[in-house]
Structures are given as structure tokens and as C-alpha cells.
Image: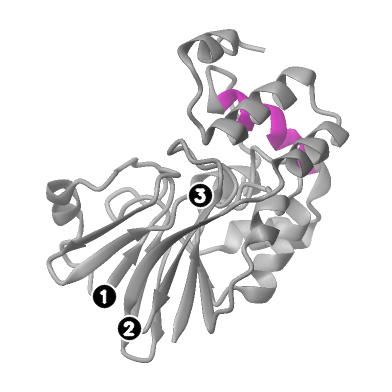
Amino acid sequence: MRILVLADIHSNWAALRAIDEEFDHCVFVGDLVDYGTNPLPCIDWVRRNVDAHVRGNHDHAVAQRVQATSGQGFRQLAAATRPLHWDLLDSRRMKFLGRMPVTTHFRVEETLLYLVHATPRDPMDEYLGPDEAAWSARLAGIDSDFVCVGHSHVPFCLELEGKTVLNPGSVGQPRDGDPRASYAIIEDGRPSLHRVEYDIDEAVAQLRESGVEDWVVEMSTNVWTSGGRLTREQLERYRSPR
């Protein structure tokens, strides 16, 4: 049994389309939207192919029409691309985002998965890497073989207390210094992390064609090509509110 685990697609259709894996089931742990500018095929792919999913903080914000504040770094990109999502998404797709559960369980034969975007303690907003002590405190009361999470855009696989915490990394905006699309596979109960190259130039072209400002194209290009590792100089360049 082969389960494809995806997270943090962020409207990057070029990256999602590059994941050419055979699977029996697919789960998605949130953040379909923001940052990229091609949400329609991403949402439709998830609706067609995913067996279980949860809502991410960006899905929630877009569905609830929360205006992103400018500020610094990635927040600026969310603020710049979110209004475009409101223009593009029809009521059916907006309802889909808003009705995604915050947490869910999914069973495949003898394997039980618990899905949450961030952590069980704070399902949408807490950032947590492969910290054994911190995860141990957050797994109390969670009955599952796998706890599948996203949000940090950094992949990891952590074994503790008879459970596996699995973060597949980000499909559409990796932040671990590797620009390739990131995902995970659970095959017959064994997890593995994977990367695949995708056409970043295509993603940039789609962004440019959307009509966003030039600085959004420039910053997004730097984020995608660096695997999310912007330099101090680049961060300072995008520091001012817009």
C-alpha cells in the first residue's frame, strides 16, 4: 500500500504537476493557496486525487477573506498574492477551502494517520521542527501510527513513542535550501522523503502573467531558486511595507 503525503502546495501548479508518483491513496496536510498565482488547477487536483485533507492557515485566511498584513519577507508575498486568489476563486472552490477540517484521522488497512497542518496543540500556526522533547509533549492523547504535518516547509521524519511524525516538506515553496518540490511516501508502513525538480521558470512566467508587481516576481524568483533561503540583503530589500 503506497500513500502519497503532500503539504504546502501554495498555488504552484508547476511544482505539483512535477510529482509523478503512483499511489494508492493521497493525503494533504494544508496550505493550497497564497504565494503562487495558479490556485485553480491545484485545488482541482486535490479535490480529484486526495482521500483526506486538512486546512492550513493560508487556506483559512483566504476562505475567511482575511487581509494579509504587509510587513517583511514571506508575509509580503502573501499580502501581494491573496487578492488575486479572491478574484480567481469561485464560490465552490472558496467553500472547499473553508470546509476543510482542521484535523482528521485516515486509516489505510492497519495504518492510522492523524493529519494536522501545524501541531496538535496549535493546528494552524505553531512552527515546530524535529524536536523530540517538544513533539513528545504534543503527542499526548494522539492515537495514530503517523502524525502528518506541514507548515514549516522543511521536511523531516521523527520516530518517537511508537509514532512517526512526518513532515513531507513543501511542494510549492521549500524553505530548507533545496528548491526541488518536496513530498513523502508511506509504503507498507515505511516512510520516505523525496524531492523532484520542477520548471521554476514556468512558475515565474505564470506569476508574471498574473499581473503582480515586479518586486513580487523578483522576490518569488529568489525564494523559489534558493529553496527559501533569502540572504540578509534580500530580506532588507523587501522589508519596507508596500
Label number found at residue 145: 1
Position in image of residue 68 (x %, y %): 60, 29
Q: Residues within 10 Å of mark 1 (few under 14, many from 20)?
A: some
- The amino acid beneath tag 2 is Thr
Residue mark closest to the camera, 2 vs 3: 3
Q: Residue at x 12, y 48 (%)?
A: 133
For residue 91, say whether it is visible. yes
Q: Is residue 118 magenta?
A: no
- The amino acid beneath tag 3 is Ser
Whole-angstrom CA distance, mark 1 to mark 3, is: 22 Å
**Mark nearer the N terminus (2 vs 3):** 2
Quadrant location, the N terminus: bottom left
Q: On the rendered structure, is 94 left or right of 212?
A: left
Residue mark closest to the camera, 1 vs 3: 3
Residue farthest to the bottom, as pictured: 109
Q: Residue at x 55, y 77 (%)?
A: 51
Q: On the rendered structure, is 22 left or right of 93?
A: left
Q: What span is colored magenta in the figure? A: 75-86
Quadrant location, the C terminus: top right
Describe the element under mark 3 as helix, strand or loop: loop
Q: Please identify the quarter of the rendering in which residue 62 is found.
A: top right
Q: Which residue in the structure is indicated by mark 2?
A: 111
Q: On the rendered structure, is 101 left or right of 95?
A: left
Position in image of residue 29 (x %, y %): 47, 60
Quick one: 108 or 96, which is closer to the camera? 108
Q: Which residue in the structure is indicated by mark 3?
A: 170
